[in-house]
């Protein structure tokens, strides 16, 4: 048999294969539990939230930046929407103002990130870590640190709990956002500029690209999708709570990195990032089904992230043609 | 006196191109030995072999008469060879003493013994009269002072040989003089100095002996008495050059003035730069590294700010913004191709498109077909290899990368193209193509400003040549016959301004 050919075939759809193998393993390990309609639906529901986030957070990642505030922004946006709806006595106007206000909040946080990164040169890691805490504080203040239930009205509950053609509405939102994000990144000047600035900011500046503007828009996009995800999450849970999206920053980063986005910028795609979200969702679901206590989930997921990033860095290093191969030195000898 | 260092028959190839062809090079203890040659003559390669950065493909190295193998920097270091790099390798936030003693800190029971270290560094400083304080933080020092810290470091390591590569490139005259004194002191102390510089005047002043390299071959070794400036220049350039590449008839342009620069000044970098560029004219800007050529070009283009002076473009004041200047018909090909010229991960097509979205998109949506068509057109027109606009520019060879950068601008209607070191690191075939492209551009009315350190290139392409020296325009060759020698003499400072009066 032609080994190279098989390698090539496997390599091209490598990502899909990893997912298939994991799902197959889970099906065998948990017969009659993993591969059921209700379980798959539950996986889809959980990934729809960070799937939505990924669609916007990929922008700063492509620029070589980062957004660590998405979980906090989601919580604050959800809290804003729910408290607004409750205060407006569950009216439709309340829903409109609540949702619009929540989204605006996300955009404002993103705008602040973009301005501080471009005007003051503060590293994105630092500023978004700071706003993570600030915005989380806002979420706590909005909710008074309580669980605020919100079972009505139907229009709001539909966002996260409704179905369209038998598929949860949140999945539709995710799909919609993914398409929008895909179109922006591949079909518009903005998208081209994002990849270009992420790949070489100085060359872009000398080519007349308005890289500051591009950067600001990228952070706004990330804030917007985080807020949208938070509102959908609040609707899904029918409540607002400051801790609603705790740890989601990690999910989103994991999904992006596992999906092959480079933290150095310039590389990554929405489709692969959504795939990453699937993988994270499936792994998490599997851990739960196997009865592993949730305390261990974080540990496991972070190991996955580190492994993915290390592999990414290693492959990049090898591609760069430098001779030292680090940990994988012996294996790299042949190439 | 026997030689401290002897390199015999050194051979080095890069991809079948011989860069060093059996070069002999020897340095005696306590001499200042200058290493001269044009760009690409093989000076840096020879030094890199000596310091263990490159492996050699042939030849032997002797140190104090014994054969040695230098496989890495540490081997060179152990023999007592230090290099003072152009880009300094100090840690700015640490003090002079900490930098000098870095990696060799004196300790007592694991605790740093600052007192004895300070004394050692202080003794060295006063011995050589360096005039810096051991406790000063390096980032507060001037470039010249930092250089002395590097020298101090080499001395504290008891180096027997110090290599200086273009040490005065970013120093003022006064600072250079101070450095020369240090070099002389080192020599008197028995330390050998290998001195690499394009500034001929300082080479003549300092060196006891001089080795000239040309095209990877040792052309001559001269003793102090044998060093005659004009001869050395001739040795560097080579006699057998045909007349056409050794000199050129310049021609003044009668076309209207397109760009007028008046008294442009950026404090501490360049001052009183004035020149004009006519329509359809190629003007060459010569000068040594550090003369301020790139900096002037960046200011004109709007990439950097300037302090005073005027720039007029077609009779109007030129904005100081890149985006506005591109709209006016500017193009800019930077010197540092890899870091400033292109986005390596993106395809040729998308790199080209980057400067063209004003015509390739409407309402922010990219017209993908038009984009592809333009990409293919440019690949065809500039003969970019491989012949596929979908390949990431980072995967192309140097020459094709440069063509891709050019394609970004040639796809637009250019009124003026600023191009900095157009053929650095590019093979001869691609060089010719790039010259042809520049000549075509000029024939179609685009003005070209070409900064170059390659004398043949300047003579071949330019219609007029400006020579910059130490942040100022030293002279301009605008008509009559000019030779490589003329330019080299002007840029390296053999001639004084008075000597140039016959122009």
Image: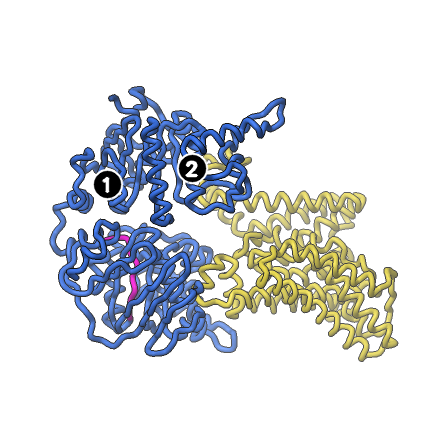
**Quarter of the C terminus of chain B within the rendering:** bottom left
User: Which residue is nearer to you in this view: A215 or B236?
Assistant: B236
Image spot of residue A154 (x, y percent): 83, 74
Q: Is residue B288 above or below residue B59?
A: below
Image spot of residue B222 (x, y percent): 19, 35
Q: Are labels 2 and 1 assigned to the same chain?
A: yes
* Chain A drawing hue: yellow
Q: Is residue A170 above or below residue B486?
A: below
- Circle 1 is placed at which residue position? B204
- Circle 2 is placed at which residue position? B130
Please give the range of residues in magenta: B447-455
Q: Are marks 2 and 1 in contact (CB under 8 Å)?
A: no
Chain letter of disc 1?
Answer: B
Residue B404 position by quadrant: bottom left
Pick whichever of labels 2 and 1 is earlier in the sequence.
Answer: 2
Q: Is residue A271 left or right of residue A204?
A: right
* Chain B drawing hue: blue
How packed mark 2 is, by other alpha carbons closer than 10 Å (few <14, some 14-19, many 20 or more), is some
């Amino acid at each position: 048999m032609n080994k190279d050919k098989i390698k090539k075939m496997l390599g091209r759809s490598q990502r899909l294969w990893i997912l298939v193998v994991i799902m197959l393993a889970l099906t065998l390990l948990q017969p009659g539990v993993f591969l059921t309609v209700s379980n798959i639906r539950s996986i889809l529901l959980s990934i729809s939230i960070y799937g939505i986030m990924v669609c916007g957070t990929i922008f700063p990642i492509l620029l070589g930046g980062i957004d660590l505030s998405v979980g906090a922004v989601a919580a604050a946006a959800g809290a804003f929407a729910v408290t607004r709806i409750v205060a407006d006595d569950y009216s439709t106007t309340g829903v409109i103002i609540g949702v619009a206000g929540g989204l605006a909040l996300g955009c404002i946080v993103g705008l602040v990130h973009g301005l501080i990164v471009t005007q003051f040169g503060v590293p994105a890691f630092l500023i978004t870590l700071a706003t993570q805490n600030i915005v989380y504080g806002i979420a706590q203040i909005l909710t008074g640190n309580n669980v605020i239930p919100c079972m009505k009205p139907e229009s709001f509950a539909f966002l996260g709990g409704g179905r369209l053609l038998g598929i949860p509405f949140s999945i539709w939102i995710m799909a919609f956002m993914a398409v929008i994000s895909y179109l922006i990144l591949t079909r518009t000047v903005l998208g081209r500029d994002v990849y270009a600035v992420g790949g070489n900011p100085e060359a872009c500046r000398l080519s007349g690209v308005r890289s500051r503007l591009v950067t600001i828009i990228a952070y706004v996009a990330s804030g917007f999708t985080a807020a949208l995800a938070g509102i959908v999450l609040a609707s899904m849970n029918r409540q607002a709570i400051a801790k609603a999206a705790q740890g989601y920053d990690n999910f989103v980063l994991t999904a992006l990195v596992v999906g092959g986005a480079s933290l150095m910028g310039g590389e990554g795609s929405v489709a692969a990032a959504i795939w990453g979200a699937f993988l994270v969702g499936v792994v998490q679901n599997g851990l739960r089904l196997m009865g592993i206590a949730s305390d261990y989930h974080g540990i496991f997921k972070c190991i996955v992230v580190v492994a993915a990033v290390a592999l990414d860095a290693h492959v990049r290093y090898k591609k760069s043609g430098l001779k030292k191969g680090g940990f994988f030195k012996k294996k790299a000898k042949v190439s | 006196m026997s030689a401290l260092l002897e390199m015999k028959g050194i051979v080095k190839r890069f991809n079948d191109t011989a860069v060093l062809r059996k070069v002999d090079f020897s340095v005696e203890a306590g001499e200042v030995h200058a290493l001269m040659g044009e760009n690409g003559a093989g000076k840096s390669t020879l030094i890199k072999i000596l310091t263990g950065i490159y492996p050699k493909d042939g030849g032997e190295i002797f140190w104090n008469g014994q054969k040695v193998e230098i496989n890495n920097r540490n081997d060179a270091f152990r023999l007592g060879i230090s290099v003072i790099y152009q880009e300094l390798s100090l840690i700015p936030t640490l003090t002079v003493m900490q930098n000098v003693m870095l990696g060799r800190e004196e300790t007592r029971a694991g605790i740093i013994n600052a007192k004895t270290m300070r004394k050692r560094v202080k003794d060295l400083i006063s011995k050589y009269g360096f005039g810096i304080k051991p406790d000063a933080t390096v980032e507060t020092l001037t470039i010249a002072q930092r250089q002395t810290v590097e020298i101090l470091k080499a001395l504290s390591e008891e180096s027997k040989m110090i290599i200086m590569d273009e040490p005065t490139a970013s120093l003022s005259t006064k600072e250079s003089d101070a450095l020369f004194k240090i070099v002389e002191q080192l020599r008197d102390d028995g330390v050998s100095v290998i001195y690499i510089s394009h500034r001929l005047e300082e080479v003549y002043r300092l060196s006891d002996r001089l080795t000239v390299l040309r095209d990877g071959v040792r052309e001559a070794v001269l003793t102090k008495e044998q060093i005659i400036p004009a001869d050395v220049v001739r040795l560097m350039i080579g006699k057998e050059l045909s007349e056409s590449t050794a000199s050129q008839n310049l021609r003044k342009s009668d076309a209207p003035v397109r760009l007028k620069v008046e008294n442009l000044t950026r404090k501490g970098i360049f001052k009183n730069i004035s020149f004009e560029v006519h329509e359809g004219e190629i003007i060459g800007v010569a000068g040594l590294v550090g003369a301020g050529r790139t900096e002037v070009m960046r200011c004109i283009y709007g990439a950097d700010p300037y302090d005073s002076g005027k720039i007029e473009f077609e009779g109007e004041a030129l904005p100081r913004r890149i985006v506005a200047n591109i709209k006016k018909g500017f193009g800019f090909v930077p010197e540092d191709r890899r870091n400033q010229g292109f986005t390596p991960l993106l395809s040729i097509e998308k790199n080209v498109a980057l400067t063209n979205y004003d015509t390739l998109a409407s309402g922010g949506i990219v017209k993908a077909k038009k984009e592809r068509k333009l990409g293919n057109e440019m690949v065809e027109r500039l003969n970019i290899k491989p012949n596929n606009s979908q390949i990431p520019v980072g995967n192309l060879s140097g020459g094709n990368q440069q063509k891709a950068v050019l394609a970004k601008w040639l796809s637009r209607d250019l009124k003026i193209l600023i191009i900095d070191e157009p053929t650095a690191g590019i093979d001869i075939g691609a060089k010719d193509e790039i010259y042809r492209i520049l000549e075509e551009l000029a024939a179609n009315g685009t003005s070209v400003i070409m900064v170059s350190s390659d004398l043949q290139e300047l003579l071949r392409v330019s219609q007029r040549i400006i020579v910059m020296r130490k942040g100022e325009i030293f002279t301009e060759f605008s008509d009559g016959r000019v030779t490589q020698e003329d330019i080299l003499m002007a840029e390296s400072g053999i001639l004084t301004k008075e000597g140039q009066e016959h122009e």
